[in-house]
Amino acid sequence: FAIFVVMAAEAEMKPKAGTREEWAFWVMEIVFTVFFAIELTVNAFSTLFWEFAMSGWNWFDTLVIGSAILTQTNTIEASGLVHLRLLRAFRVLRFFNRLPSLRKIIVALYASLPAMSNAMGLTFMVLAMYSVMGVSL
């Protein structure tokens, strides 16, 4: 959650190059990368290789953390890899698998989408009718 807040603050502030704010966000980026790399390493060594390799979330984490390390160490040209670091905000989605009550809420929201789209369509039609009537008067 903290990475999401920091990324949102950085996008809102848009710090200029060479300022203290840019340096502070760079330090936070390094801290998050180190923290996530340690977490991934502990996860890899605490489970069996096949169990670790068969999880899609572990592949996702490896891709995101690997791209962050490569871009921060300037080992390769960071043209598209910088944007992969933004995917770290989606790590929050892992909680949906671990918390059954949160999963129930997400499933209920997903199941309500057809009914909500019908209500939105009806509201749009009523709004369109009143718009035509208002222009005609």
Image (cartoon, helix red, strand yellow):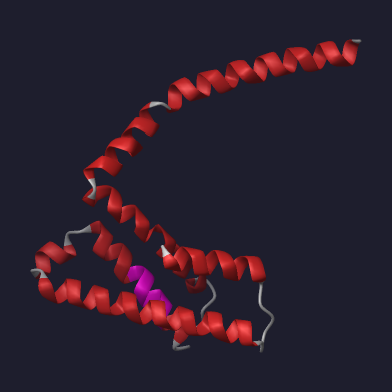
The picture places residue 120, in percent across and down from the top left corner, at 57, 23
Q: Is residue 33 above or below residue 12?
A: below
Residue at the right extreme of this rendering: 137
Assign the N terminus to one quadrant of the image.
bottom left
The picture places residue 114, in percent across and down from the top left corner, at 44, 23
Q: Is residue 65 magenta?
A: yes
Q: Residue at x 43, y 83 (%)?
A: 30
Occupied quadrant, residue 65: bottom left
The picture places residue 99, in percent across and down from the top left corner, at 24, 48
Q: Is residue 12 above or below residue 114?
A: below
Q: How many marks?
A: 0
Q: Nearer the viewer, residue 52 or 118?
A: 118
Q: Nearer the viewer, residue 73 or 91?
A: 91
Q: Residue at x 40, y 82 (%)?
A: 31
- Determine if residue 71 is in view: no
The stretch in magenta equals: 63-69
Q: Residue at x 20, y 59 (%)?
A: 55
The picture places residue 12, in percent across and down from the top left corner, at 64, 65
Residue at the left extreme of this rendering: 48
Q: Residue at x 49, y 85 (%)?
A: 27
Assign the C terminus to one quadrant of the image.
top right
- The secondary structure that most of the magenta stretch takes on is helix
- Determine if residue 22 is in view: yes
Q: Is residue 26 magenta?
A: no
Q: Is residue 23 above or below residue 128?
A: below
Q: Nearer the viewer, residue 61 or 97?
A: 97
